[in-house]
Structure formats: structure tokens, C-alpha cells
Image (spheres, rainbow, N blue to C red):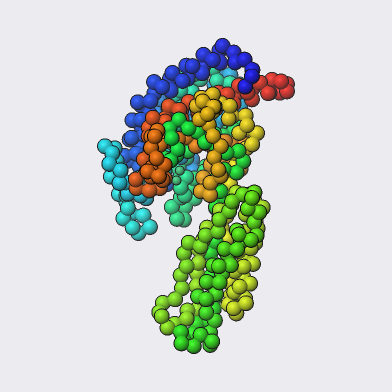
Amino acid sequence: MAQTVNAQQTSLSARMDKTAEGLEKKVVAWRRDFHQYPELGNREFRTAGKVAAHLQALGMEVKTGIGKTGVVGILRGGKPGPVVALRADMDGLPVTERVDLPFKSEVRTEYNNQQTGIMHACGHDSHVAMLMGAAEVLASVKNELHGTVKFIFQPAEEGAPQGEEGGAYLMVKEGVLDNPKVDAIFGLHINSQTEVGTIKYRPGATMAAVDQFAIKLKGKQTHGASPWSGVDPIVTASQVVMGLQTIVSRNLPLTENAAVVTVGAIHGGIRQNIIPEEVNMIGTIRSLDNSMQKTIHRRINEVATNIAESAGAQADVKIDIMYPVTYNDPKLTDQMVPTLEAVAGKNNVRITPAQTGAEDFSFYQQKVPGFFYFLGGMTKGKKVEEAAPHHTPDFQIDESCFVLGMKTLCHLTVDYMSQTGKVAAVSGK
Ligand SMILES: [Zn+2]
Ligand SMILES: [Zn+2]
């Protein structure tokens, strides 16, 4: 940015950075505590309690129980301006920790009728701790803030337990973006396979939309020795699985965006010499573009229905729309990348390929412009192949990235407020 930053702003930046650095030990301690006592989605009672107490101690207006266990803190700045939301997710996963750490999780539970450990195997413990730190930094400069900050601590990013609503979807439904109305939202995700100091982002479609499908194929049961007297749904299902493979390879403009159709489970039959009446299959769809998503849905229906018909069977296709695309508003992304570059160093901020994983931050971005980025959490010099991926028992992060994470959250907030304030002043709002 070519414009001269005024002295007041410079000193505000410097003070925020100093405060963030001074909070490092505290943030690490919070993270270790959350790590040791992880909670599954919609059950983040202990975590939410600690978050709420912290925000209250900072003098914020605090709301609890939003979207089950969600916590929202509102920090009203000393001067008028836009409302910026910062979001952290709080849930752990049904994974049994294998990392040998003094604060390793020993928590055990039953999940889907199986005994399992609970672990912060996606790093959400660090998101909560960093956002608590950022809240403390921004509260310390409250009087100088040109606007309001809404701190959103969200449950169940990884999905709610069966039969329950949850996550960003439910918080949005319960009005988390209203009253005061949010103008822009920022969120980050730590990454166990990106070096500390590096920040990655992507303008536009960043993480995929997720839908799930279920196909029921109904044939006609008969003796395995005389298949001609029935309709074999197993052979038909095999053809359908192969037919589905041609959707991505033959029906989609692949140079524009990636997409995935995966059949994840297939069930049918009970004995070697019985051709069953029915076969059921379920799968997942990942897409980064709305029109490609529509094509996939249409083709799954056509492929399954017509292959079944050609065999004399019947297909019943159900598609459930789950998560939207995590879409970084291009204008907001352009506006905020210089801030990340100023905080992390220009060479440390990079564009990353789109991912076919999903993130429910997308539900906020459907309502307001949002920017979601990735914070490196792998020890410098470590090989990516040696760093365990997210959602695995060996997942680990390097805490030395927390200060950078806090600084990015604080600077995005302050810069957005001052830039938006200037635009408003120029346009005479
Ligand atoms: Zn995850
Ligand atoms: Zn995650």
C-alpha cells in the first residue's frame, strides 16, 4: 500500500504486536489445557465456560448457548465503524491421541457404539486459544477501535452428532451475524503440514462444497445358480459405480475446478448362492463451483436411474446438500492480503491450491463477505511427509505460530475498520 500510515496507526500496530507477544505464554497454556481436555461437537461445555469467563473478564458483552454451546463476545470500540467478526471453532474429534506430550489427552468416550479417545486432532484447541489472545489484545486498545468486534466461538465444526443440528449453520440460523450486523468475517485454520511463519490463502473457491448421496438399487431376488430368473442388483450396482466415475472424467470442465464423486460404502447380499433383492450404496460429492455441483447431481440421477432401468432394476437416488463452498470474497481477499503480507512478510504469504476438504466457515460466507486463511503450524525444517495430517492420532502442531496467528487476527480487524471507515468518509456515508 502506497499511502502513508499515520503515526497514531503505527503506534497502535506496534502496541498490539507487543501485547500479542507478551501473551504468548498465556495462549500456549490455554491451548495445552484445551488439548488435554478436548470435547466433541455440541458438547464443548468446559471449553465454552472458559472462553465465556475470559471474555467477561475483558469487560465484553457475552452471549452463551448460541448454536448449542457457542459463545459470542461483543467488543464495542471507542469510535463508530463497521462490525468485524472473528471466528474460532472449539470441537475435538473421536481420535485416540498417540503423541507423547505432557498435556496429551486421556479423555475416553463412546462414539457411534465404539470406544474411542477424544483428541484435538484438527488443531481447534489452538484456534480457541489464539482467538482468546486476540480478544485480549483488541480489548486493550478498545478506545481506539473504529467499530465493533464480534468474537465467535463455534461448536461442532466437524459436524454435529447424529440427529442434532450444529456448527456454523446453526449459529447463523440463531442470528449470530445479526444484532449488531456483521460487515465482514475472518477466520483461520492452523495447518500441520505448512511451516511456521507461512500463511496460505486462495481467492474465491478455497474449500469444497460437500453433498452426500445414497442410491438404493432394487432388483429381483433369486437363486444364485439361476440368475436369469431374477434381476441382479449386485451386477447393476457394479455398473452404476463405474458409471459414476465418468461424471468427473467426462461431464465436467476440469480445467476450471476440481470435483470428486466417491462411493464410500456398498452393501448387499447375505450368502454366496443368493442373489439379493437390494443393494445400497452411499458416497460423497466434492465441488468448488455451483454449476459443476448441479451437473454432478443431475448426472448421478441420470446414470443410476438409466443403468438400473437397462438392467430391469429400479434406482432410488437421494442427494443431501451438506456444506457450501468456502468462498473467499475476491474483493475482500484483495483488500486484506496486504495486511497478511505486512504482518508475516511478503514472501511468507502464498496462494494455495483449492482443497476438496470442507469447512463450515462457508455458512458465514454465504451471508457476509468472509476471508479464511491457513496458518503454518509445522516446525520449521521438518519434512512434510514426516508431519502427520489432520484427523490422525499423530497430529501435532508447533505452538510457536500462535503469536503470528493472533497478530493476523488483530491486524485484519483494525485494517478493515480503518480502510472501510475511509471508504465511507470518501463516499460521504
Ligand atoms: Zn478437521
Ligand atoms: Zn478443522
Residue 402 on image: x %, y %:
42, 30
The residue depicted at 46 percent of the width and 73 percent of the height is 268
Residue 245 on image: x %, y %:
57, 63
Residue nearest the viewer, comparing 289 with 350:
350
Name which quarter of the figure residue 90 lies in.
Answer: top left
Q: Is residue 401 above or below residue 356?
A: above
Task: State whether residue 121 appears in this view.
Answer: no
Q: Residue furthest right?
A: 427
The residue depicted at 56 percent of the width and 72 percent of the height is 239
**Total number of numbered labels?**
0
Residue nearest the viewer, comparing 38 with 386:
386
For the C terminus, the quadrant is top right
Q: Residue furthest top?
A: 7
The residue depicted at 59 percent of the width and 15 percent of the height is 5
Residue nearest the viewer, comparing 157 with 285:
285
For the N terminus, the quadrant is top right
Q: Is residue 84 above or below residue 167?
A: above
Residue 290 on image: x %, y %:
64, 50
Residue nearest the viewer, comparing 423 with 193:
193
The residue depicted at 52 percent of the width and 60 percent of the height is 262
Residue 401 on image: x %, y %:
42, 31
Q: Could you tell whether 45 is left or right of 67 in the image?
A: left
